[in-house]
Amino acid sequence: MKPIRLSSAHVGEPELKALSNLLCPNTYLGMGDEVLHFEAELANYLGIHEKYVVAVNSGTAALHLACTTSCTKGHEIIVPSLTYVATLQAISAAGCKPNFCDVNIHTATLDLEHAKSIVNAKTKAIMPMHYAGNSHNLDAIHHFATKHNLRVIEDAAHAFGCTHEGKKIGSFGDLICFSFDGIKNITCAEGGAIIAFNDEDAKYCRQARNLGIVKADNDFDVNNQGWRYHMSNIFACIGRVQLSRLHSEFAPKRQDLAKIYYNELKTLAQNNKIAFLHFDQTNEIIPHIFALRILHGQRNRLKSALAALHIETAIHYKPSHLLTYYKSECILPRTMQLYSELISLPLHVEMQKEDIQYICHNIQKILN
Ligand SMILES: *Cc1c(COP(=O)(O)O)cnc(C)c1O
């Protein structure tokens, strides 16, 4: 049996064709028309004005710009410890301090009750991460943020194409950050975007992604720190094709594969050996990962047994407050519990129904 990979990009003929049209003599590979088209198409997809969409070269760059536009040195940002380290690097790169928040045991998303107990005078933003595409509690988070005068920076790296109460993630809110890296719901190879629903923020992000350069007829100026975060035409070209394939190909495939997992594993869930994460039925999810909880201390045994069968899995994520650079004495019991229970099973567009059945058959054998 060949190894089953945890995740994979799905690119082929359509992307190749678009790239071969772009890669001709005298083509421009920097930030040009392809990027402008990609931004306009993202705006159109989200149903928002294109002035709010700023394409950048990674999700991490999007998060960093969102932090620098909303916070300055010394400010604190409430963030779940259970997130990818990119979220934390964005916060610290902006000179801010992460204020680690626990998560809800059923959803693995930010626990608002805990956030209420740690918000303080230095807190300037709250950064929910839509774990596995789940925007659980987003309205309540906005309500809390308004009350405490906080900015809301959504780490929506898992949630491109997902909806919250019928509205697309990125079609409303404050600052929303997407990633289009190689394994996300759509890819540019590397890329990301910030949606900034404020003219000042959007203008700042647009300048800061391009070394802070402000152009004025035949001259230019720089007023702020900037970075080399702009997106290249090559990456935008791939992203445009991927966006056009999301709802016709990728979303139904990911959703079907997840359904097979639920179906094949439901007896284990009924027998309390595993627990699925909870999702609000009013939200549509395009699952970027398929994570579940393995109960009764069996996770590591399962993970090793699957590895021996060449089935790749992952733990999303090692809590950030345990990392040397971000070490903190905070007590996050549900984060630690999930860290010992969570496993992410293979999920990507190149998988077949039989792959999932094979994985589930083995999980049943190992856990029973
Ligand atoms: C992928 C990801 C990022 C970073 O995106 P890049 O495009 O890889 O820089 C940030 N946060 C989360 C939760 C992610 O999954």
Image (spheres, helix red, strand yellow):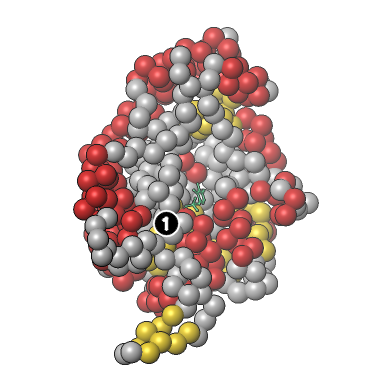
- Say whether residue 18 is left or right of residue 101: left
- Mark 1: is the Cβ under 8 angstroms from ligand 1? yes
The residue that appears at 23% across and 42% down in the rendered structure is 14
The vertical placement of 52 against 268, above or below, is below
In the image, farthest residue toward the right: 329
Q: Position of residue 149 (x, y in %)?
A: 54, 71
Q: Position of residue 280 (x, y in %)?
A: 41, 40
Report the number of numbered marks.
1
Kindly indicate the quadrant of the structure image that contains residue 232: bottom left
Kindly indicate the quadrant of the structure image that contains residue 332: top right
Circle 1 is placed at which residue position? Answer: 192
Front position in the image: 115 or 263:
263
The residue that appears at 37% across and 90% down in the rendered structure is 219
The residue that appears at 33% across and 56% down in the rendered structure is 234
The residue that appears at 71% across and 54% down in the rendered structure is 326
In the image, farthest residue toward the front: 25
Q: Name the secondary structure under disc 1.
A: strand
Give the residue type that dot 1 points to: Gly
Task: Evaluate whether residue 315 shows in this view.
Answer: yes
The vertical placement of 292 against 112, above or below, is above
- Say whether residue 360 is left or right of residue 308: left
